[in-house]
Amino acid sequence: MYNLFIPRNSVKGVYLLIIEIIKPLTITIRDMKYKLEPGHFIYVGSAWGSGGLTSRIARHIKKDKKIHWHIDQVTSTPLSAVKTICFLPGAPSNYESKIARILSTKLDFIPGFGSTDRRRDSSHFFICRTYIKCLEIVRFLEKTIRHPIILVTVY
């Protein structure tokens, strides 16, 4: 059993963030500007560092941080909020790309977002529009990849 709530837990794996963008937001990816309209999005990531899933998710939720990853442009602004975290503790490292490829066949996406280290992936940031659609997609993924997904609602 995994306890994801112990500080600096070393449980590693893959995660999805369901993010709500409240007002229009412009981000830059590879010198391209994208205007994100209000709605819901799914971001796919992985946590293989010493802090594991707990540390990575805590960073994503924090607003005051140095912009390091593409997703930081979204999560650091007051125009967005992480609504739900979907954990896949212990998922193999290839599941990040596997999930991204499945999502790219089901949803629109921002090209190259979050996938510069995985060049074969089209994106790691997907447009759901509604929260319900995001939840439906997560449940579809769980059945498709046959790995349990733990959902934690942030707000």
Image (tube, rainbow, N blue to C red):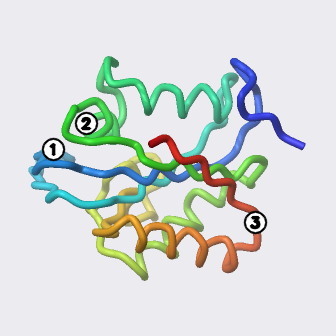
x, y (%) of residue 113? 32, 52
Residue annotated with mark 3: 147
Q: Are marks 1 and 3 in contact (CB under 8 Å)?
A: no
Q: Is residue 147 left or right of residue 152?
A: right
Earlier along the polypeptide chain: callout 3 or callout 2?
Answer: 2
The percent coordinates of residue 73 (x first, y second) are 25, 36
Q: Which residue is mark 2?
A: 73
Which residue position holds label 1? 28
Q: Residue at x 34, y 18 (%)?
A: 65
The one nearer the camera, 97 or 52, is 52
The residue carrying pointer 2 sits among few (fewer than 14), some (14 to 19) or many (20 or more) residues within 10 Å by Cα, namely some
In front: mark 1 or mark 3? 3
Give the class, few, some or many, for how many residues have Cα within 10 Å of label 3's Cα (few <14, many ≥20).
some
Q: Which mark is residue 43?
A: none
**Residue 79 drawn above or below residue 99:** above
Amino acid tagged 2: Gln
The answer to whether residue 143 is left or right of residue 23 is right
Quarter of the image where the N terminus is located? top right
